[in-house]
Amino acid sequence: MDGLRLTDEERAMLAGEHGHGVRRAMEMVIALARIYGATELVPIKSAQVAGVSYANIGDAGLEFLRQWADEGARVRVPAMLNPAGMDLLAWREMGTPEPFATKQLEVVEAYQHMGVLPTCTCAPYLLERCAGLGDHLAWSESSAVAYANSVLGARTNREGGPGALAAAIVGRTGCYGLHTDPARCPTELFEIAVAPASASDWGALGAIIGRASRGVPYLRFSGHAVQTVADLAAADLRDGMRALGAAAAATGSVALFHLEGVTPEVRLGQVAAPTGEAQVVESLAPAYSLLDGEVEALDLVAIGCPHASLEQLETVSRFLEGRRAAIPLWLTVSRAVAERARASGLAESLEAQGARLVADTCVVVAPMREMGVGAVATDSAKAASYLPGHQGVQTRFGPLERCLEAALRGTWQ
Ligand code: F3S
């Protein structure tokens, strides 16, 4: 006998009283809860579902989704989609192969049939207040999970796509792992003596932490870095922590970090620094030499991994003022951020500067090789760590300004 207690409503879902699709979802949620030793399920506030790009899920995944939808499965909490394999509106002009596009649209349609919102972003937390301190969630995308847990103080494990969808359908998930207090306690101390000066530096730091961490890292800036970080504008600090979490999750298995004086569970005294010797980070150079390749001639510059904020788009536009990119410059964003940029006139300025706002997708999940892209520069440590292996694309990694200079010239120097 296991110790998982179910409410009457949960039993009814499991018994099929809410339909076949709900029973299938409840079976999945319960199986996971049992594997991880949960004693109860907790209601979730939202779900964020990965497994959207047709390049990743293929026909088998599409069939699975259709079947589940046909069984009557519908989400009962707000559920959002991770990026798809293409811009859902501008795919033709971007050169997405038509057979791929047709299948991709069918995948999104199957999700929509179940009530999942086609947000197609890895940064749903930029859209609205979809998660806050102590909220239980079932999110999939690793960078969003790291951000939700660490910066928002919400509680989510890193769910697989089907697990997140199942949780959305029953409105619950097993109370285990990062939903519980003990698993949120920091296990290792990192002392950081270098102040990140750009999003790529934050990502480089994340890559170092991700490779070194075996649990929940507690980060403490030391020396002059403390004041430098304290002086950052709120949006820069937020975007820095986005880059850090994304890289730490991509290069390791970090789903939660605590940053002294900054992240909510530290500020509220809910967690304390671990005792014992700190691992000291004195330089970000090892991450740059690991992630930066050697190619010089570029096909594309990609900014916006995780999906860019409005503030990041403004920074790009300021830098490019009076100049124009010589090669494709993708700024990957959620559709909601793209629409805000359009409404404010920012999108128009960026387009005049040769940039393209690319919504719903990113360079890691779009079929880049089929689109003729073999060499990319990015300021994202996460993208730089995935592109060579996932896409077979040669990659340069560096600060935003250096990437934009490369877009103006077409080469990395
Ligand atoms: Fe998002 Fe794609 Fe990067 S899903 S975190 S932009 S790899």
Image (spheres, rainbow, N blue to C red):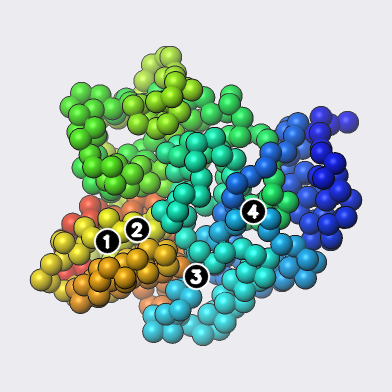
Q: Are marks 4 and 2 in contact (CB under 8 Å)?
A: no
Give above or below for 355 relative to 212: below
Tell me the quadrant of the picture where the N terminus can be found: top right
Between 283 and 389, the one nearer to me in the picture: 283
Q: Disc 3 marks which residue?
A: 85
Q: Disc 4 marks which residue?
A: 77
Q: Are marks 1 and 3 in contact (CB under 8 Å)?
A: no
Given this view, does label 1 or label 4 mark the residue nearer the observer?
4
Mark positioned earlier in the residue sequence (1 or 3): 3
Label 4 CB-ligand 1 distance < 8 A: no
Give the residue at the far left of this rendering: 322
Give above or below for 21 relative to 95: above
Between the residue at mark 4 and the residue at mark 2, the CA separation in whole angstroms equals 26 Å
Q: Disc 2 marks which residue?
A: 308
Between the residue at mark 1 and the residue at mark 3, the CA separation in whole angstroms equals 22 Å
The picture quadrant where one finds residue 41 is top right
Q: Are marks 2 and 3 in contact (CB under 8 Å)?
A: no
Mark positioned earlier in the residue sequence (4 or 2): 4
Q: Are marks 4 and 3 in contact (CB under 8 Å)?
A: no
